[in-house]
Amino acid sequence: MSKSNLEWQQDSTQNQKPPLSLQNVYVNYGTRKGNVQAVRGVTLDLYAGESLALIGESGSGKTTLGLSIVRLLASTAKVEPGTIIYRRDQREVDVLKLSTSELRQFRWRDCAMVFQSALNAFNPVLRVWDQVLDTAQAHGWSDRTAVRERFLDLLKFVQLDPTRVINAYPHELSGGMRQRTLLAISLLLEPQILILDEPTTALDILTQRTIIGLLRRLKEEQHFTMIFISHDLAIAAELADRVATMYAGRIVEIGKTYDLFYQPRHPYTLGLIRAVPTVLGGFEELFSIPGSPPDLVNLPSGCKFHPRCSFATDKCKQQEPELEEVGERHFTACWHWQDVEKELELHPIRRGAAKHDALAQTTVEVR
Amino acid sequence: MVPIIELKNVSKFFGHGKERVTAVDSISLAVEPGEIVCLVGESGCGKSTTGRMAAGLLPVSAGQVLFDGKDIAQMNRDELQTYRRAVQIVHQDPYASLNPTQTIRDIITAPLLHHKKVKDRTHAEKRARELLEIVDLTPVHDFMDKYPHQLSGGQRQRVSVARALTVEPKFIVADEAVSMVDVSIRVSLLNMLSRLKNEFDVTFLFITHDLALAKYFAWQGRIVVMYLGRMVEEGPTPRLITDARHPYTQALLAAVPEADPELAQHKRQIELRGAEIPSLLHLPLGCTFHPRCPYIVEGQCDVHVPRLEAIREGGSVACPVRKDESIQLVV
Amino acid sequence: MNTIRNIVGWIGTTLRLLTYNKVGFIGFLGVLLILLLSFLGPYIWPIQAVGNTGEIFEPPSALHWLGTDDGGKDNWIQIVNGGKNVIYASLIAALVSTFIAVTFGAMAGFLGGWVDSIVVAITDIFLTIPTIPLLAVLASFITLNNFTFLGLLLGVLGWPSLLRAVRAQTFSLKERDFVEAARALDLGTSHIIFKEMLPNMMTYIVISFALGFTGAIYGQIGLILLGLVPFDSSNWGVMISWGWNHGALFFKDSVWYIMSPIVAIALLQLSVITMTRSLEMVFNPRLRSGG
């Protein structure tokens, strides 16, 4: 499908300024157990046309951060201090200051979010087309034929049979089809940014591949600006230009995908990579990270990762490190990143190489 | 050696008449003592059903389940009881597999006391502490009086394993036992299970949809791939991963997202002819994979049900068309 | 010694859990107060045989805390004496209906098959019986002047909806992983039912018991009000019925008389229902926060 056909409103002419800038964003939840510090001081720029993966385990704050960008947090959540600046066509707004009606427009036209549980996103008693039309009309787009045409195009783009899906009830679609339909709907109003929360979790492998293929096309052919939120490193490896590792509500490392996967400088990123097996990367020894994810009500002192970190010293128990530049566009919040570098020189991550071992055992035959 | 668990032409049907669904279709699988076997497949392939039949938790519709060479349908009361306790299961969902109204102490001591594995409560308490230590839930006194909801997912899975160990099992079916646990913790759980295998002579049937986990856990063992209730390929893990022969296995291996950017870039993609899995209610004739298979031979694949045939490189493949053809998945 | 300590410990824990939810604890205290007043109160304020005809429809005063009725009898004394039988019969009704519902509902859900079919069929038949008309018919044959009997009767008619719920819960619990694990561990049917499944239904059963109790109160009051149960002794239902039949609704001064039993009933219902919030806390460990 050609770019003109879908008419993405990509705006790359805003003086090289990133379409989304998060400045020192904090999110707190009041709960019965106490104050949950879900996001603690995140600063992040998202550039036009790039895809960024936020990775981390449960409780790392990645989903909360995603939800705070589209302001879909529970009412018990407080987003302060911090600013979330959004830019489009010379316009510059603080998302946190938008009114309810402005927000509704923002969520579809500027920054759409696709959720993990695709079934819940649909109204079970409405056909897909009715929901699409409702959405379009709610945003002042009442030209039925135009909406239909665009939606049919989008369904084709996500490789679904348009006539079958458009008249179906949500329960008549399989999980993968729902996820793709949802993706099509979220593109309906030509948003500038797409946030995808666990886009492939709970889907079958072959379906995951279809979704990844689609997202790759959005990225490579349409240069769409996207944020992927996932606990799955594979999503980052397959789709992201840049990766940010989150731990206990903070970005602890951010950099280009290759740098992060092969030259991580934060012990947590290194730990994650060494804990996850590949399929075709030959046999690799894996190591788990000791301990459990932190209790967000009672966070440890100093660096929040120190109780689980093999590099930790007394300094880590007392002072929390800030992000510092350790390479080109590569930042890490660790007092001992040089030690991690030395460790990697001794025991490099050899997956890219391991692939050749796997190859050597394979008798080559290509149809 | 006598297999510890053997399935002979085991099938499972659900429902009746037009609604009848064949969840598992004539599977034969023998697990030797000490062997690690991994059942791999997508949702609806029948892997969990197979596991539950092997564990005796679901009656078979046809075929036989043999424990230590003896058909469980022919067993007397005592033998059945021995089998019952020798085979345990660890479930997928750590939030559903423990009773929310019981403390960890209740959960572990109940089977010990019920089966008179210990003299009295004091000994049960002592044994429970030992078991929690074996599954690395330390310090033990932090856990004994907790309720399941006060533990993390990984910790709950450890409790599940400790509970299974109370009856000194010989065979454990681990049904997606680590899928719902945080990635940083998974490996330690898997390593713990491997340790149990060596220290307590437990044989594992590991069921998962995650090929990467299967590869890691069963590198010394075997992987069995299922599709729509049938076994399509089986073999020693290194062979199956590097030289898969069945087009479905190849498609799965090519499709798995890789946690490595190099690999992700250089993996070959296999285009299937159809994206949707057929419904179990209307299974295709012949090979159930033929509507999606890129190598279909008309008049053969859509007519004859392929049998598993042994291949020289190890294991067997249910595809007469492609069983001797290797392909390269990383380019 | 150990058992005593255990029991004391258990009571202590339970009391502590009851205080967890403030509204629930107030309800618990309310129930306790009403029970004490109804069962011990009559010894302090015995019933008056005759009233003082000089003090008809008096408003509350230091002498008559809730005023007097049309015969000059003290309302407070009547309220204190009028609760015992109503509460007693309702307790019996709730016990009977909960017992039937839990026993047969769990059995049907757990065993399934033909046992389930029979239980469901009987339940459906009972569900279609209209209680009040049936009682009206029965009242013409038997004299319903015994509270135990009345309680039994209300209980025997009150179980079907709870049974259906218990059966459904048993069905879903039976499929839970932890029940399957207990089967794999060969812990036996009685362990599975009483240790694994029942505790998970306790919250629901207790709430149903409370609802059965309040339902039985309404049932009784309705029967008395309709005159289907010819009671002569003083009780809250009779007070309302008496006041109604004597046109108390039309006298402004009678407000204290007619409202006293209504408020008493409402307070009891409210206390029982709010108390269940605290009982939930006792039976469902998940509701107790982290700790």
Image: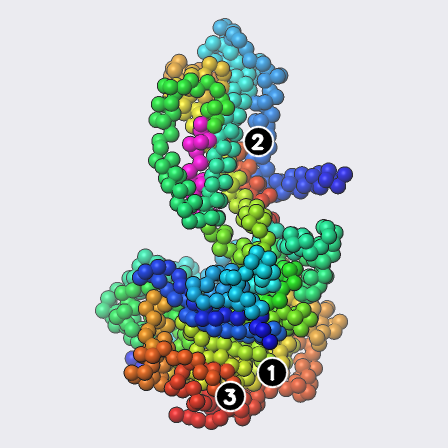
| Residue identified by numbered label 2 | C30
- Horizontal and vertical percent position of residue B133: 71, 63
- Horizontal and vertical percent position of residue A24: 57, 68
Q: Residues within 10 Å of mark 3 (few under 14, many from 20)?
A: few
Q: Residues within 10 Å of mark 2 (few under 14, many from 20)?
A: many
- Assign a secondary structure to mark 1: loop
Distance in Å between CA atoms under marks 3 and 1: 22 Å
Main secondary structure found in the magenta portion? helix
Which dot, 3 or 1, sits closer to the camera?
3
- Assign a secondary structure to mark 3: loop
Which chain is mark 3 on? B
Q: Which label sits on residue A284?
A: 1
Distance in Å between CA atoms under marks 3 and 2: 78 Å
Which chain is mark 1 on? A
Q: Is residue B32 above or below residue B22?
A: below
Asked if the magenta segment contains residue A277, the reply would be no
| Residue identified by numbered label 3 | B313
Q: Residue at x 43, y 90 (%)?
A: B325
Q: Amino acid at mark 1?
A: Glu
